[in-house]
Amino acid sequence: MRPFLIAPSILSADFARLGDDVNAVLDAGADVIHFDVMDNHYVPNLTMGPMVCQALRDYGIKADIDVHLMVKPVDRIIPDFAKAGASIITFHPEASEHLDRSLQLIKESGCKAGLVFNPSTPLHYLDHVMDKLDVILLMSVNPGFGGQSFIPSTLDKLRLVRARIDASGFDIRLEIDGGVKVDNIAEIAAAGADMFVAGSAIFGKPDYKAVIDQMRAELAK
Ligand code: DX5
Ligand code: ZN
């Protein structure tokens, strides 16, 4: 398995001083910035669009930006995010009419592509697209809000997806999003995840480096 990646979700950052908060979490050792896009349609909350992603690039943020689209429809917004500096774009399969087309659109835009599975979304969406995936993201909460509790049944789903990735031979990251904390990250890694989104666990604490160091210590166990 590849090195673990820690991806703080800026959903829990200070939006009034976002650029500085993103720099702070990168200085604290974060690998990737997780960027939650909510449309008050596919999910019951409204966050940020491509302009904010572009603003972070303009501010000098060089790290990979992992754009998690919780929007419907998805295709229209994909090229806009690619132009705004997204590195990875993931979307929920049930929010796209044409899964394969949306994945191709992301790749053609020059970004890495991924599918996101809600806790109850079946895995059959993976059936014919494994060769087009760079990331599979499993939601361990229902999407829409930070600060929810990790749904334990996600661990079994992680094990299933890990087995599927390994059997496929493709180079696909297994990302987990929702309720990831210092005290459950080791168990989540043991179930097969190699990329960890954490919002409230990191931005909710005054010392980002202390939390990220603790997460890495847990992952090294
Ligand atoms: C939820 C978002 C998550 C959220 C995670 O819909 O996709 O990325 O920010 O927040 P925590 O880590 O607080 O559960
Ligand atoms: Zn997310």
Image: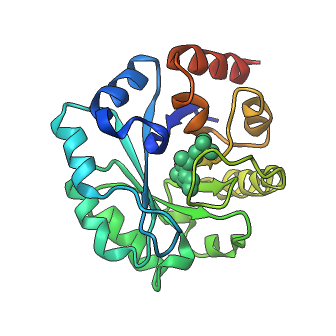
Find residue 195 and report its image quarter. top right
Question: How far across and down, in percent of the image, does residue 60 sit?
Answer: 19, 31
Nearer the observer, 144 or 110: 144
In the displayed structure, does residue 80 sit left or right of residue 99? left
Assign the N terminus to one quadrant of the image.
top right
Farthest-out residue, front: 16
Asked if 149 appears above or below 210 in the picture, the reply is: below
Question: How far across and down, in percent of the image, does residue 17 sit?
Answer: 30, 32
Q: In the rendered image, is residue 37 in sight?
A: yes
Q: Which residue is at 50% across, 35% downward?
A: 8
Nearer the observer, 38 or 6: 38
Q: Which residue is at 20% across, 56% downward?
A: 83
Question: How far across and down, in percent of the image, does residue 111 sit?
Answer: 33, 55
In the displayed structure, does residue 11 sit left or right of residue 165? left
Farthest-out residue, left: 58
Find residue 38 and report its image quarter. bottom left
Q: In the rendered image, is residue 85 in sight?
A: no
The total of numbered circles placed on residues is 0
Question: How far across and down, in percent of the image, does residue 135 sit?
Answer: 53, 53
Assign the C terminus to one quadrant of the image.
top right
Find residue 115 and report its image quarter. bottom right
Q: Which residue is at 78% across, 52% downward?
A: 151
Q: Which residue is at 81% across, 49% downward?
A: 155
Q: How is the image coloured?
A: rainbow
Nearer the observer, 51 or 160: 51
Nearer the observer, 56 or 65: 56
